[in-house]
Amino acid sequence: MLKWRAICICRVMAISLSGVIRRWFLTLALLVVLIGLGSQGLSAADSNERLIWLRAEIARHDELYFKKAAPEITDSEYDTLKRELRTLEKTQQPVMGDDRSGDFATQRHRQPMLSLEKAYTAEELRTFINKAERTLRREDVVWVIEPKFDGLAISVTYEGGNLVRAVTRGNGLEGDDVTANVLTITAIPRQLPAGAPAVVEVRGEVFIDYAEFARINVERDAAGEESFAHPRNLAAGTLKSKDPAEVGKRRLSAVFYGLGVWEGAEKPPATQQALHARFKAWGLPGVDKVTVVKEAAVWSAVEEFGRERSRLSYPTDGVVVKIDSRSEQLELGAGEDAPRWAVAYKFAPERVATRLKAITLQVGRTGAITPVAELDPVKIGGTTITRATLHNLEEIKRRDLRVGDFVYVEKAGEIIPAIVGVDLELRGSEVKSYVLPEKCPECGVAFVREGTSVRCANNECGAQVRRRIEYFASPSGVGIGGLGPALIDTLVAKKKLTGVADIYRLRSEDGVSARVLAEIEKSRRVDLARLIGAMGLPGVGKKGATALAVRYRTLDELVQAEELSEESRTLLKDLMAAGVTSSVPGVLEKK
Ligand SMILES: NC(=O)c1ccc[n+]([C@@H]2O[C@H](COP(=O)([O-])OP(=O)(O)OC[C@H]3O[C@@H](n4cnc5c(N)ncnc54)[C@H](O)[C@@H]3O)[C@@H](O)[C@H]2O)c1
Ligand SMILES: [Zn+2]
């Protein structure tokens, strides 16, 4: 603004004056402009450019986060970008994300699903609360503090007491119709008891608790698949899956804490506390931790929750502080994208600094290469960490990581810590740029380039062999209890295991316990589909494995199958030679 006004003044003056005086004036005007700009920090042009960049960057992260379930930055980094945009915009324009994936029918919300105003400090929280109380012209307002569940917002509609629809928040006005997937969540009742309103929209969150998150990641890890970084990504990815059968295999949880439409003879509950009680009476999963306080006690209650948070069985990223009285809620109403009677206080993720000692490479079952940050041991969230995942090689470049750098590591509910930044002030001259080796660190065979990543294409690579055996023995494979990565490593080192079929040649002399041997014995007759899946044949997923099993029924038949590669055929023959007699259940018994 200032710059443009100054330029206009220059123009007007330049026209009306002439000669020396004109040049004199121009110089003076220019000086005024420069001094003005110098004292302002970002110039108007700069901040405009920044604004455009921020909008594009946020849109890019929304796309990665909501549509691809593969965020590149942590939530706190994302929130920082968003706050900067809000400050620059200084407008009330909604800047809500959009979770719609394009894979589901769109449903318009009969009442918009809003976001929440955020507070990051005690001061910001107090400002919000004071403003609300001033507007209400009351001081003894009752506030309710609830956990801020870290999942995906959902709106479930019951008509005549029957569950008819479940829709995600989407862009706030319309969302994805995920009814089929929500019906797999057993905790959500299909029907409300008699007396429920004719139409009611209950709002809440779908999430995945820590135990289920760990269970799924252990399986994925054993399968050589990338693990989920955060329970919320997993919950979102699951709720947005196109296959309800797959959704049913993951235990999604739900909680309800809000109201959309309410049409009925009776009025909605008069307070937030009464709403919680009503939801519970209806059999809906409700909020288990609710604190009721006056303004003066809000902050200590928030701190108290912060201390207990790590002991909860489900992920939270803060608390939501709400006005209890429904009439006061209605009196305050809502702004463009958030109500004026509720605010989310977000806990800062725990962040520590440590030194990046080295970057090593992990070789997956299929030869995929993942870089890993090796760190000086440091305590975070009660555990000592020595490593952090770097999702891909690009991330090293994007964050400009140099070996020897001091890096910030964050853990915000996620199990796997992430590197969120580099302390450039502490960067010494001894740091080294990372140079990607040309050969596989495990087998020494040259990498094959695949776009921005690399792969070890050597099938006999020691790491790949170990990962394949791990996968085969894991619960996702044939499930051999007790034959885990540590024992496999030892047996591979002793050359007792050179491939999957060697499992069936193990004996107690090899240092394998009777219990594990019994488990191995049991797995010889495993269901054929499961055996095929456990072999991890390229291009054969779970569905493909079932199709092959149904078609060929026994190993003898399968080994003749035309569609098998020579490699797979050799492996099957080897398994048969080692005494595996897998078949479709029932086939052998009938013979
Ligand atoms: N890392 C990334 O790249 C990236 C990109 C986009 C969005 N995000 C993240 O996605 C989130 C979406 O942002 P947002 O602005 O909608 O805010 P938000 O999701 O953090 O807060 C609003 C939501 O809180 C939920 N909520 C949980 N418990 C609640 C309770 N007790 N009462 C009321 N509501 C409750 C509701 O679903 C509501 O929609 C943010 O956490 C943001 O960091 C991250
Ligand atoms: Zn290799």
Image (cartoon, rainbow, N blue to C red):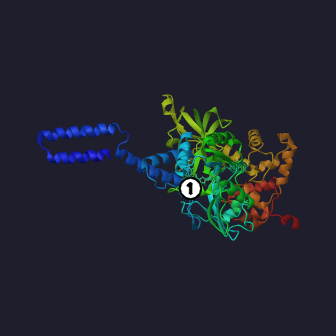
Q: Which of 68 and 310 is in front in this view?
A: 310
Residue in the picture at 74% in, 39% down: 493
Q: How many labels were placed on the picture?
A: 1
**Residue 163 rendering spot, x and y as whole percentages:** 69, 67
- Mark 1 sits near ligand 1, with its Cβ under 8 Å away: yes
Q: Mark 1 points at which residue?
A: 66
Farthest left residue in view: 19
How many C-alpha atoms fall within 10 Å of the one at disc 1: few (<14), some, or many (≥20)? many
Q: Is residue 429 above or below residue 581?
A: above
Q: Which of 487 and 172 is in front in this view?
A: 172
**Residue 500 rendering spot, x and y as whole percentages:** 75, 50
**Quarter-wise, where is residue 490 in the image?**
top right
- Residue 73 visible somewhere in the drawing: no
Left/right of residue 292 with respect to residue 491 in the rendered view? left
Q: Which of 424 and 232 is in front in this view?
A: 232
Secondary structure under the numbered disc 1 in the rendered image: helix
